[in-house]
Image (cartoon, helix red, strand yellow):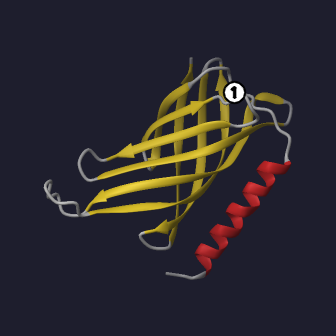
Amino acid sequence: MNKTLPTLAGALFAALLLFAITTNLHAQRPGGVGVGVQLGDPSGLSLNLPTGGRASVDLLAAWDLDHFFFINGHALFMQPLGSAPNFGLFYGPGIFIGVRDRDNRRWEFNDQVYVGASGTIGLNYFIDQFEIYLRATIRLQLIDRTDANAGGGLGLRYYF
């Protein structure tokens, strides 16, 4: 593995966190809870929860029915782009945990657990109570081993 990739991912995550803390932005999303799906890497169910503060909580759960479960959570900050209030930029720091079954033996704990920090950035567009988004996420795995990778996807959420 290239040793500069984890360093670059860590620096990008730190810059994103600093930008999120020092910028006074207001969310543009509709009120209420957003529920939807994301297709990409990983694909899964998406949930966006209001917090009453500047950020919302964004959760993504993905699995492959028998061998893998993954959950990624971010503090999500949103900012309108230009004069179009329905089109915006979102970003935020987060964490993830993943569990992979190594050999399908149900009576023996032989799972790999992955834990680490992540950062996401993307574009979104709101049509009434619907949000369409495109995101990129970098992940810095810290537990089980040190590794870095990227993912992202195209998503759709409905806000209640």
User: Camera-side residue: 136 or 108?
Assistant: 108
Q: Is residue 114 left or right of residue 160?
A: left
Tell me if 85 is positioned left or right of 44 in this view.
right
Q: Position of residue 1 (x, y in %)?
A: 49, 81
From the top left corner, tell me how far across and down residue 139 is, in percent. Answer: 55, 61
Q: Label 1 crowding class (10 Å Cα cut-off): few <14, some 14-19, many 20+? A: many
Residue shown at the point (73%, 55%) measured from the top left? 17
Disc 1 on helix, strand or loop? loop
Q: Residue at x 73, y 56 (%)?
A: 16
Tell me residue 79's x, y (percent).
78, 38
> Left of 59 or right of it: where is 55?
right
- Identify residue type, mark 1: Arg
Check the image and report above or below for 48 versus 68.
above
- Residue 160 vs 43, above or below: the answer is above
The residue shown at (61%, 28%) is 131
Between 83 and 145, the one lying in front of the other is 145
Residue 71 rendering spot, x and y as whole percentages:
45, 47
Place residue 30 in its image quadrant: top right
Drawn side of residue 151 relative to residue 25, left or right? left
Which residue shows up at 41% across the image and 70% down it?
Answer: 144
Q: Which residue is mark 1?
A: 29
